[in-house]
Image (cartoon, grey):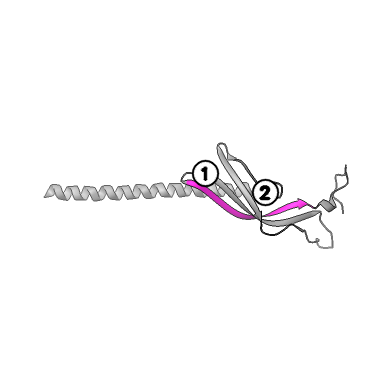
Amino acid sequence: MALVILATAGTATFAWINVNLDTVRRVRDREAEDRLREQMAAWAQALDPARQPEGTAELAPGLPVQWTSRPLRAMAPVPPLPGGTSTPFRIALVELTLRVPGPAGEVVWTGRRVALERDADTQPPAGSTRAPR
């Protein structure tokens, strides 16, 4: 009888340990994905979706990142600055999606960015280093 009680207690203990080990593994995977998403968000700040609407690069050595962007608003002239000063740029709101292989599958980060490009009608004259006024 004591052997049956010991076996039952041992089985329950091993099952409890297995559940805890699975939970620890899931927590570690989630923490790794969260760190990866933070890196992706920081990396996306340097990305110019107007010049490169899609592509691939390395987020870190051996860690490829693939991105795509889609415009949420069409390119529009930047409103004049206070005092009526115009700018030679156009802006658009774009949705940026980054994909990176993660520890438990693909990690996806989606955010919104402003795409900025020089307006073709206000290009500076050839050889000029200053923007037109």
Instruction: Name the residue that disc number 1 marks.
Output: 101
Q: Position of residue 125 (x, y in %)?
A: 88, 46
Label 2 packing within 10 angstroms: few (<14), some (14-19), many (20+): some
Work out which residue is located at the far top of the displayed protein and give it: 61
Q: Earlier in the sequence, mark 1 or mark 2?
A: 2
Q: Position of residue 120 (x, y in %)?
A: 82, 51
Please state the total of marks drawn on the protein image: 2
Kind of residue at disc 2: Pro
Q: Residue at x 14, y 47 (%)?
A: 3
Kind of residue at disc 1: Pro
Lateral position of residue 6 relative to residue 91, left or right: left
Q: Which residues are magenta?
A: 105-118
Instruction: Name the residue that disc number 2 marks.
Output: 53
- Majority secondary structure of magenta residues: strand
Q: Position of residue 25 (x, y in %)?
A: 40, 46
Task: Locate the C terminus and report the quarter of the image it occupies.
Answer: bottom right
